[in-house]
Amino acid sequence: MQTLDPVSAAASGGLTSPAVARNTAAILAVLQAHLPARGRVLEIAAGSGEHAVAFARGLPGLQWTPSDPSPEARASITAWRDAAALPNLAAPLALDASDPLSWPPDGAVNGPPFEAVVCINMIHISPWAATEGLMSGAARMLRHPGGLLCLYGPYREADVPLAPSNAAFDESLKARDPDWGLRALEDVVGVARAAGLVLTLRTAMPANNLCLLFRRVQVASR
């Protein structure tokens, strides 16, 4: 699964992405408004790790755990984490959203549950199985009703004309891999609902992106 946008090396030894520089402040503002003051957050497909550092710094009461299936990405996350030296930023996990066995064990016996799961710019640069795995995995991690899943990225919406820049982006993604591309929002909402996650907020973001907030409404029976 691809998790890194075009990147270059940074002084920290990690990788840096122009996209991260453009969207971090806007995403952080949404997280600050909707995440709890305390608890644990799991970030899926954390990429270069720049978001993880910015969010851990901007949300000091939360314990932030980044993850990524790519060794290159995890090395970059580790470099940014070491440079930042933030007490609430954990080492990255080797987690592939589409692989249930790579997710952290769930259940109270394995530690406190996560209050939130965050996933930025993954759904359109991964096979559909990764979205299905994201929803089922997030539902397992968010064991408390009201637990939050936050998604960020571009989507197709019924009755909303696709911006020319997003249409061109979609074509470029499919040219790179036919399993990639902008997903229909209704399809994403449907697979989330099937996992027990309900869309509660759609927020328009800069550059024709959306921030989507889902809440856990049903705790899986044991």
Image: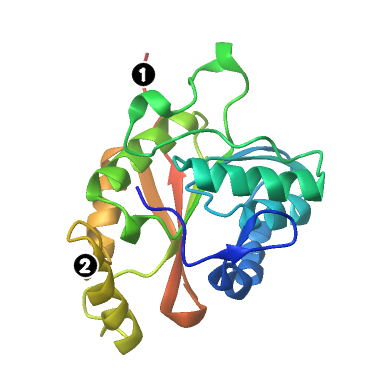
x 22%, y 80%: residue: 159
2 or 1: tag closer to the N-terminus: 2
Q: Which is more toward the observer, 9 or 177? A: 9
Tell whether 66 sits left or right of 3: right
Q: Nearer the viewer, mark 2 or mark 1?
A: 2
Label 2 vs label 1: CA separation? 39 Å
Residue that label 1 marks: 221
Does 203 appear above or below 80? below
Q: Quadrant of the C terminus?
A: top left
Report x, y in % for residue 75.
Answer: 60, 43
Circle 2 packing at 10 Å, graded few (<14), some (14-19), many (20+), is: some
Circle 1 packing at 10 Å, graded few (<14), some (14-19), many (20+), is: few
Report x, y in % for residue 37.
Answer: 74, 45
Tell whether 195 sits left or right of 63: left
User: In this rendering, does residue 143 appear at all?
Assistant: yes
Does 90 appear above or below 123? above
Tell whether 127 sits left or right of 38: left
Task: Work out which residue is located at the far left of the displayed protein and give it.
Answer: 178
Amino acid under disc 1: Ser
Residue that label 2 marks: 174
Does 158 appear above or below 181? below
Regarding mark 2 in the picture, which secondary structure is present there?
helix
* Number of numbered discs on residues: 2
Report x, y in % for residue 38.
Answer: 73, 40
Q: Which is more toward the observer, 151 or 124? A: 124
Q: Which is more toward the observer, 75 or 47? A: 75
Does 19 appear above or below 114? below
Report x, y in % for residue 179.
Answer: 20, 56
x 49%, y 25%: residue: 104
Regarding mark 1 in the picture, which secondary structure is present there?
loop
Tell whether 111 sits left or right of 156: right
